[in-house]
Image: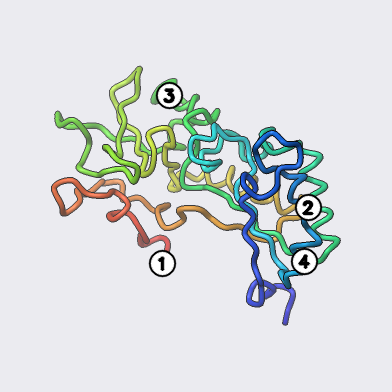
Amino acid sequence: MAEADWWTEAVIYQLYHRSFKDSNNDGIGDINGIREKLDYIKSLGVNTLWINPLTLSNQVDNGYDVMDYKKVDPLFGTEEESDLLIKEAKERGFKLIFDLPLNHTSDQHPWFKEALKGKDNPYRHYYIWADSDGDPYPNNWKAGFGGSAWTRELNGDQYYLHLFMENMPDLNWDHEPLRKEIADIINYWIDKGIDGFRLDAFIYLDVYKDFPDHPDEWGEGQDVVENGEKLK
């Protein structure tokens, strides 16, 4: 098997660190807890670790609402402990898959805070916005966690899209500067030793910007945008 095809024979162990092993007795699983159990995981015949989000988050959705893609959340440990985990996992022959939520960020992410400053802000186009023609919302899309998939900005007249939670605004993958930022983030983690990524909510990245209504009177926006043409 060629090295590039390692994933075809991967035996994957998912590490939901929050509930895996608490090394400091604060009630939350952590990075050092994973490190302590690497030999045990190896004894199971596993060769690949899938690590759920460790990045800085507001923790509204268990780490999937990212505030900074390049920082480790201190809830789980330090940057140094993260680097040690990668190093020690590599020493044991593990491949590493990092869970990377790229469909949306937290509304506390610096990009979104900038986007809220107005339509002329360069980060405005990092997210998906729409006007309303007098109805309560731009269309009849429902969010995956309930309510409308649209929320009106506090200091303006446009609505931002969130296919999941209100505080998880969707990213605009049609915008080239965003794609370049994402590529930089991916390369950052590859340089640290990550071998691959699980791209959370990947099937929703191609959003039709004419925002067609759901065929139902009030239907899931995810139904309309999933598996768009650019993903095929």
**In the picture shown, does residue 16 fall above or below 155?**
below
Q: Identify which amino acid the numbered label 4 is placed on.
A: Lys
Label number found at residue 42: 4
**Which dot, 4 or 2, sits closer to the camera?**
4
Question: Label 4, label 2: how many angstroms apart (C-alpha)?
Answer: 14 Å
Name which residue lies at 52% across and 31% down.
Answer: 111
Label number found at residue 116: 3
Question: Label 3, label 2: how many angstroms apart (C-alpha)?
Answer: 36 Å
Image quarter (top left, top right, bottom left or bottom right) of the N terminus? bottom right
Label number found at residue 193: none
Quadrant of res 156: top left
Q: Nearer the viewer, residue 98 or 24?
A: 24
Q: Are marks 1 and 3 in contact (CB under 8 Å)?
A: no
Label number found at residue 232: 1
**Which dot, 1 or 2, sits closer to the camera?**
2
Q: Earlier along the polypeptide chain: callout 1 or callout 3?
A: 3
Dot 1 surroundings within 10 Å: few (below 14), some, or many (20 or more)?
A: few
**Which dot, 4 or 1, sits closer to the camera?**
4
Question: Label 1, label 3: how many angstroms apart (C-alpha)?
Answer: 32 Å
Name which residue lies at 49% across and 25% down.
Answer: 113
Q: Earlier along the polypeptide chain: callout 4 or callout 1?
A: 4
Q: Identify which amino acid the numbered label 3 is placed on.
A: Leu
Q: Give coordinates of residue 19: x percent, y percent.
A: 62, 47
Q: Secondary structure at mark 1?
A: loop
Dot 4 surroundings within 10 Å: few (below 14), some, or many (20 or more)?
A: some
Q: Earlier along the polypeptide chain: callout 1 or callout 2?
A: 2
